[in-house]
Amino acid sequence: MLRARQTAQVISSGLGIQARLAEIGFGKFNNGPFISVPKMTYELPELEQWGEVEKRVIQAIYGYQGDVVFVSHMFPIRVAIAHFLGLDEDESLGIYSFANASISVIDVKNNRVLAVGSPRVSDRLLKKIEEIL
């Protein structure tokens, strides 16, 4: 989580905006080594469940006005993308692995996903983003 927090701080200080970060709740595994979480099934009672994460992530997305940058690890990003594609947890299993520092773009106003785990902002992606701004 430290890497995501540091990335959010760099982006927020560069843009002069506030950084806020909340990842999935790991219950008794919070603040421990990631390897201690059993196989990341998300079915353990200690872990925040898919529906809880989805509710929190979507509330955060709609809780802001204007253009927003969220910095996160893969699971909350997968939840957001699945929500906007109308997928449930099982249906979203293919959206499972992004490279570090990749970019996913959601046009919330028009309910569409523009990019998933892109390694860079291509000219084509930039044009799509500019069209919604």
Image: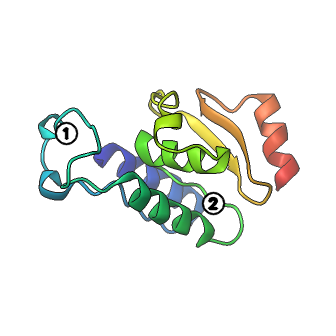
Percent x, y of residue 71: 48, 50
Instruction: Decide which of 84, 101 is in the foreground and name it.
Output: 84
The span from disc 1 to disc 2 (Cα, nearest Å) is 28 Å
Is 111 left or right of 6, judged from the image as shown?
A: right
- Kindly identify the amino acid type of the residue bearing the numbered disc 1: Phe
**Where 26 sits versus 94, above or below?**
below
Label disc, if present, on residue 34 of the rendered structure: 1
Among the two numbered marks 1 and 2 on one chain, the one whose residue lies closer to the N terminus = 1
**Where 21 sits versus 89, above or below?**
below
- In the figure, residue 41 lies in which quadrant? top left
Query: What kind of element bears circle 1?
Result: helix
Q: Quadrant of the C terminus?
A: bottom right
Percent x, y of residue 98: 48, 29
Query: What kind of element bears circle 2?
Result: loop
Percent x, y of residue 84: 65, 49
Q: Which residue is mark 2?
A: 68
Indicate how the structure is coloured in the image. Answer: rainbow
Percent x, y of residue 14: 55, 56
Instruction: Decide which of 73, 25 is in the foreground and name it.
Output: 25
Is 84 left or right of 44, judged from the image as shown?
A: right
Residue 35 visible to the viewer = yes
Q: Residues within 10 Å of mark 1 (few under 14, many from 20)?
A: few
- Kindly identify the amino acid type of the residue bearing the numbered disc 2: Val
